[in-house]
């Protein structure tokens, strides 16, 4: 029988064995990264465009263009495209953030020859039908109206605007922006950033035997342009404390944090580790104190996020309005503990194992590993990063983390955004 009086034994976790990607160029010099593996006859194709919202000329231009890519060409209506993909058991995903836009195709490899031409034609030659544009715009506008009443939505937008100001990372949409955008804006954005594209291509899974020739046929003629120049961006350090009262709000949304660097800075990974100790997993300090002990919230987290040009640290939660001040007090108490007391070796070991477990989970299979590779390339590295990362984890100690907390996590150096019941 299991002896529950004995503490569980934690086994040291090592880095997974990453699949070595094959790299080849198409006739137009487009870079393709192929990762073969998996036990099912499926493949995934990702096209990563430098078409994020930071290069748009109008609000909503990047997100609407990305969302409507597969909604019709001169020869096929959107419903015909989707019905054809459904017939072959294929499906697509689209995603866009400040830096990049991604369009993904998932298909059985035996139907790769039928699905790929349809998919590429839809991406290259969308007409953005006016009726589809108006429906998507109305849906986004209604969703925006609903979200604009939520304290969490207001706090998030205020937080990023406070940190990044007029930079695109700090931009937030307004209701008036929905009346300014037109279908032609989508056509123009597509012509500039998709038809003439700076992109990389990734394919993973059990690949068809003719993968390279098919990609060359349908992607080898894509009009390419040079990558957008990456500006050096150093956000002005802000320390504002902003409390916005929202009438009749039952909860208060709290955002505490600061702008910082991204993964190119030597302190980024140790600071990210510190954010996990603070609030990056279910047994973290913030969760143990503010959820488990005090019962003030359903969930609270801390994170350190890297973007292409910079990064940020953030603590976020929503609490009952009458608990706002107590929650703030306890958050700053946990930050103070990090600055003044060494993290016990047992906790350090636990968090290191947790992070290694998350890496194993994120590298489970070729689809997951190709996603990791995409992110590595955006950061300017590849799987070799994980060798140095494990070395960094091994060298992390309590003294270094305490120094880091004193360097970056002082209460007076952090922004504080509270939206909701701030009457206290």
Image (cartoon, rainbow, N blue to C red):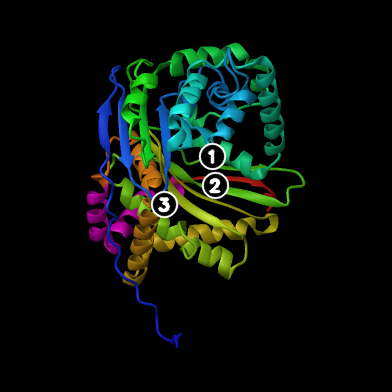
> Magenta span covers which residues?
386-413
* Left or right placement of residue 258 versus residue 327 in this view: left
Disc 2 designates what residue? 255
CB-based contact (under 8 Å), mark 1 and mark 2 = yes
Residue 345 placed where, x, y %? 31, 70
Quadrant of the image for the N terminus? bottom left
Identified at 52% across, 21% down, the residue is: 122
Residue 191 is one of the magenta-drawn residues: no
CB-based contact (under 8 Å), mark 1 and mark 3 = no
Residue 80: which quarter of the image?
top right
For label 1, the SS is: helix
Disc 1 designates what residue? 159
Name the outermost residue toward the right: 248
Inter-mark Cα distance, 2 to 3:
15 Å
Tag nearer the camera, 2 or 3:
2
Task: Name the foreground residue: 75 vs 369.
Answer: 75
Residue 281 placed where, x, y %? 46, 60
Residue 407 is one of the magenta-drawn residues: yes
Within 10 Å of disc 3 (Cα), the crowding (few <14, some 14-19, many 20+) is some
From where the camera sits, is residue 342 visible? no
Disc 3 designates what residue? 410
Inter-mark Cα distance, 1 to 2:
7 Å
Task: Name the foreground residue: 105 vs 160.
Answer: 105
Q: If you read the primary sequence from the N terminus, does the residue marked by circle 1 or circle 2 appear first?
A: 1
Identified at 36% across, 15% down, the residue is: 221
Q: If you read the primary sequence from the N terminus, does the residue marked by circle 2 or circle 3 appear first?
A: 2
* Left or right placement of residue 396 versus residue 148 in this view: left
Q: Is residue 124 above or below residue 82?
A: above
Tag nearer the camera, 1 or 3:
1
């Amino acid at each position: 029988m299991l002896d529950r009086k004995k503490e569980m034994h934690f086994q040291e976790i090592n880095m997974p064995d990453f699949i070595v990607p094959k790299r080849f160029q198409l006739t137009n010099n487009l870079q393709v990264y192929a990762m073969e593996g998996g036990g099912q006859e499926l493949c995934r194709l990702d096209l990563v465009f430098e078409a994020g919202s930071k290069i748009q000329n109008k609000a909503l231009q990047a997100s609407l263009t990305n969302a409507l890519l597969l909604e019709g060409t001169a020869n096929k209506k959107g419903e015909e495209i989707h019905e054809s993909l459904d017939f072959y058991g294929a499906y697509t995903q689209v995603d866009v953030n400040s830096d990049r836009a991604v369009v993904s195709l998932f298909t059985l490899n035996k139907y790769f020859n039928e699905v790929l031409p349809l998919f590429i034609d839809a991406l290259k030659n969308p007409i953005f039908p006016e009726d589809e544009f108006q429906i998507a715009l109305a849906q986004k506008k209604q969703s925006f109206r609903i979200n604009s009443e939520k304290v969490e939505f207001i706090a998030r937008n205020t937080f990023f605007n406070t940190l990044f100001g007029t930079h695109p990372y700090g931009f937030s949409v307004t209701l008036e922006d929905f009346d300014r955008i037109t279908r032609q804006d989508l056509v123009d954005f597509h012509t500039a950033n998709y038809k003439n594209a700076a992109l990389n291509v990734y394919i993973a899974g059990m690949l068809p035997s003719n993968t390279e020739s098919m990609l060359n046929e349908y992607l080898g003629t894509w009009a390419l342009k040079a990558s957008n120049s990456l500006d050096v961006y150093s956000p002005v350090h802000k320390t504002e404390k902003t409390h916005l009262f929202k009438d009749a709000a039952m909860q208060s949304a709290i955002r505490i944090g600061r702008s910082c660097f991204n993964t190119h800075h030597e302190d980024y990974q140790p600071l990210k580790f510190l954010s996990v100790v603070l609030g990056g997993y279910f047994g973290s300090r913030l969760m143990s104190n503010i959820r488990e002990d005090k019962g003030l919230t359903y969930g609270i987290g801390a994170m350190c996020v890297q973007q292409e040009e910079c990064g940020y640290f953030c603590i976020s939660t929503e609490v009952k309005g009458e608990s706002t001040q107590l929650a703030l007090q306890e958050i700053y108490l946990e930050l103070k503990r990090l600055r003044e007391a060494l993290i016990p070796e047992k906790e350090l070991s636990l968090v290191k194992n947790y992070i290694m477990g998350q890496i194993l989970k994120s590298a489970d299979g070729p689809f997951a590993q190709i996603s990791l590779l995409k992110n590595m390339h955006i950061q300017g590295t590849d799987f070799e990063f994980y060798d140095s990362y494990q070395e960094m984890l091994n060298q992390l100690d309590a003294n270094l983390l305490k120094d880091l907390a004193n360097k970056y996590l002082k209460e007076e150096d952090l922004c504080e955004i509270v939206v909701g019941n701030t009457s206290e």
